[in-house]
């Protein structure tokens, strides 16, 4: 086979990415007990490191009696480590950084997650290498070969501000990728996206679930003809059965679900058997827990708690990510060692619509609240075509009248205007808490103008 641009890119890339791809590919096909043993070894190394180099864990692991016992015993006591809530990440951010940060190349990242709770994160170069490796192996699992073309319907702030770098463009070309911005989709843009899909005839379409559903709705409503790719993969939201069926009907393609987050890249990917989503044991430890902290049985829904095994710059150990899920009742028939998450729920966002019919993805509001450390929790409600209400739980240690709040509010308004238009009024409501909806699902964006996908 001719070497794809991506394979050339990998061969030019740093040795770590190549090594991590090999680690993942080996772990994927080991027998399940050997793959678990490999994960335990990686987990023990992380715990040992955290106990020595991360102030928060030096304290917490000692209290839990975990760091007294080296090696295997560390892993046995893993379940005694208290869960890491998002509020703790905000309050103890500095203490969660490793003490050797100055020797690492790192950058800030931020997420609003599924629950509208902004969290500041640190990712170093090694984490990025793992992220690339997970991306490559995730493509394999979801039947996307490196030499095949991929069209992404994904959020791009740079598209809104016209600041895309030539390096980013080159990277996309190398990976056989076309990117279309889904943060803000006007009817004209959606028409041009369909034309582009028909002209470029991509092998695969990948996007936010809400954006793919919106585009599919647009295609159906306007009775447009659309090229049928081999697969459509959705991420960044719950792919409910009726959405899967609808996407399958409109694109006449095999549909794959993916689960990832800013905190933990490539958390789970569906394979061609469509029996659930595989968790890459070499990169992440996932637990599904009941409210009393015990592990659920397969098929039983509980809280998803994750430990990234690959972020030493800011370890997140037993991190309550805010999603609900359940383990599959049987291993996947594909034979991979990696366990299967059956359903993941809780990641729900509504798409907003402006007076001229422009659709703004709910995911955009993660960017609106990016690195707003004074915000404990947010929910954005679209009251009408030109009225947004930002409900905010402020961090208790940040006064209402402070520079952080004043500049934060200005920044939020500016970013809302960027996507919703300058005529959109933004009202702020400071509240003590934001409750989940009657269904128990937390929605960080709510549209009163139109139903969600
Ligand atoms: Zn499988």
Image: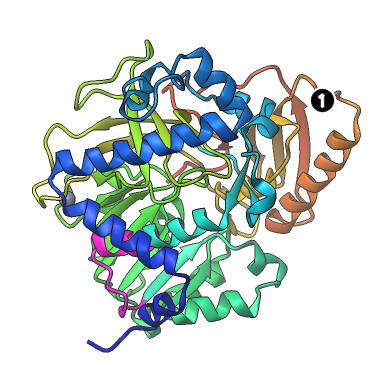
- State yes or no: residue 139 in magenta: yes
- State yes or no: residue 330 in magenta: no
**Residue 217: x percent and y percent?**
39, 58
Residue 423 or 77: which is nearer the viewer? Answer: 77
| Residue 366 visible somewhere in the drawing | yes
Please name the colour scheme applied to the rendered image. rainbow
SS label for mark 1: loop
**Residue 134: x percent and y percent?**
37, 57
Residue at image position (73%, 36%) is 373
User: Dot 1 corresponds to which residue?
Assistant: 398
**Residue 442: x percent and y percent?**
50, 28
Residue at image position (62%, 24%) is 87
Image quadrant assignment for residue 46: top left
Which residues fall within the magenta stretch? 135-149
Q: Does residue 97 appear to the left or right of 170 in the view shown? A: right
Image quadrant assignment for residue 427: top right
Residue 412 or 327: which is nearer the viewer? Answer: 327
């Amino acid at each position: 086979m001719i070497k794809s641009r991506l394979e050339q890119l990998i061969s030019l890339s740093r040795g770590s990415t190549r090594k991590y791809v090999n680690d993942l590919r080996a772990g994927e096909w080991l027998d399940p007990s050997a793959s678990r043993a490999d994960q335990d070894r990686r987990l023990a190394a992380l715990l040992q490191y955290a106990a020595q180099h991360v102030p928060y864990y030096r304290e917490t692991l000692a209290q839990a009696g975990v760091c007294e016992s080296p090696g295997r015993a560390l892993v046995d006591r893993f379940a005694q480590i208290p869960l890491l809530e998002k509020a703790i990440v905000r309050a103890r951010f500095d203490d969660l950084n490793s003490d050797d940060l100055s020797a690492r190349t790192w950058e800030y990242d931020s997420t609003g997650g599924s629950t509208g709770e902004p969290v500041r994160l640190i990712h170093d170069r090694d984490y990025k290498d793992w992220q690339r490796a997970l991306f490559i192996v995730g493509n394999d699992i979801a039947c996307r070969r490196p030499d095949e073309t991929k069209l992404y319907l994904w959020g791009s702030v740079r598209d809104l501000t016209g600041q895309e770098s030539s390096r980013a463009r080159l990277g996309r070309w190398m990976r056989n990728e076309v990117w279309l911005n889904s943060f803000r989709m006007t009817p004209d843009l959606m028409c041009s996206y369909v034309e582009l899909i028909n002209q470029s005839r991509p092998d695969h379409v990948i996007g936010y679930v809400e954006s793919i559903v919106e585009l599919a709705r647009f295609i159906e409503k306007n009775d447009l003809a659309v090229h049928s790719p081999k697969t459509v993969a959705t991420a960044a939201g719950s792919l409910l059965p009726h959405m899967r069926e609808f996407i399958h009907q409109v694109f006449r393609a095999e549909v794959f679900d993916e689960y990832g987050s800013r905190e933990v890249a490539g958390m789970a990917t569906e394979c061609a058997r469509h029996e659930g989503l595989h968790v890459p044991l070499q990169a992440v430890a996932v637990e599904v827990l009941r409210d009393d902290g015990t592990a659920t049985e397969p098929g039983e829904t509980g809280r998803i708690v994750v430990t990234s095994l690959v972020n030493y710059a800011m370890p997140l150990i037993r991190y309550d990510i805010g999603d609900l899920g359940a383990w599959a009742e049987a291993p996947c028939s594909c034979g991979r060692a990696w366990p299967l998450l059956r359903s993941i729920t809780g990641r729900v966002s509504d798409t907003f619509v402006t007076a001229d019919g422009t659709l703004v993805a709910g995911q955009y509001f993660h960017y609106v609240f990016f690195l707003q450390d004074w915000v404990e929790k947010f929910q954005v409600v679209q009251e009408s075509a030109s009225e947004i209400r930002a409900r905010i739980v402020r961090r208790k240690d940040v006064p209402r009248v402070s520079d952080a709040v004043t500049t934060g509010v200005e920044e939020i308004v500016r970013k809302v205007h960027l996507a919703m238009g300058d005529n959109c009024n933004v009202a702020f409501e400071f509240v003590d808490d934001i409750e989940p909806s009657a269904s128990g699902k937390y929605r960080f964006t709510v549209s009163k103008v139109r139903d969600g996908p």
